[in-house]
Image (tube, rainbow, N blue to C red):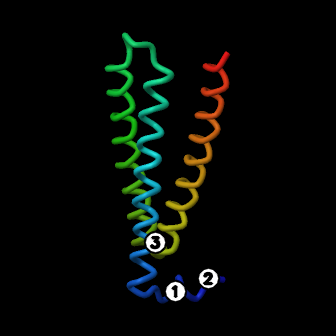
Amino acid sequence: MQASFLRTPTIAVLVILFGLEGVHGAMQQSLEKSMAAELLPAKARGSGFGVLATVNGIGDLVSSIAVGVLWSSVSPNAGLSLCRTFRFGWSTADLFLYRASALTTAF
C-alpha cells in the first residue's frame, strides 16, 4: 500500500523531494571522489579518477535504461522503487567503505 502523499504529490512535496535528492547526490559524488583520492596512490590518481568517471557513466546509462523500461512497461512507481533501492544500497556501501578506509589509514 502506498502512502497517500506519494499517489498525488503536490508541487511542494516534489520540490522538497527533488531538493533532498540533489543534496544527497552532491554528497555522494563528493564522498566518492574524496575516497578515491585517499585510497589511490599518487601515481595512479589520474587513471583512478578516469576509471571512476567511466564506471559512473556506464552505471548512469544502465540505470537510466532499467528505470525507463520499468517506468514504461510496469509503472512509474516500479521505476522509482528501483532507484530508491539502489540509492540506499550504494549510499550505505559508500558509508561503510569510507569508515573502513578511515580506520585503516589511521594506523
Q: Nearer the viewer, mark 1 or mark 3?
A: 3
Left or right: residue 19 compared with residue 105: left
- Depicted 89 relative to depicted 80: above or below: above
Residue 17's disc number: 3
Within 10 Å of disc 2 (Cα), the crowding (few <14, some 14-19, many 20+) is few
* In front of the other: 56 or 98: 98
Within 10 Å of disc 1 (Cα), the crowding (few <14, some 14-19, many 20+) is few
* In front of the other: 53 or 23: 23
For residue 64, what is the image quadrant?
A: bottom left
* Quadrant containing the N terminus in the rendered view: bottom right
Q: Which residue is mark 1?
A: 7
Q: Residue at x 34, y 35 (%)?
A: 53
For residue 51, what is the image quadrant?
A: top left
Of helix, strand and loop, which one carries label 3? helix
Q: Position of residue 48 (x, y in %)?
A: 38, 23
Contact (CB < 8 A) between labels 1 and 2?
yes
- Depicted 95 relative to depicted 17: above or below: above
Among the two numbered marks 1 and 3 on one chain, the one whose residue lies closer to the N terminus: 1
Q: Nearer the viewer, mark 3 or mark 2?
A: 3
Of helix, strand and loop, which one carries label 1? helix
Q: Position of residue 49 (x, y in %)?
A: 35, 27
Left or right: residue 96 compared with residue 27: right
Within 10 Å of disc 3 (Cα), the crowding (few <14, some 14-19, many 20+) is few
Residue 2's disc number: 2
* Quadrant containing the C terminus in the rendered view: top right
Q: What amino acid is labelled 1 in the image?
A: Arg
- Depicted 93 relative to depicted 6: above or below: above
- Depicted 91 relative to depicted 81: above or below: above
Q: Residue at x 37, y 48 (%)?
A: 60
- As measured in the structure, the alpha-carbon distance from the residue carrying label 1 to the one carrying label 3 is 14 Å
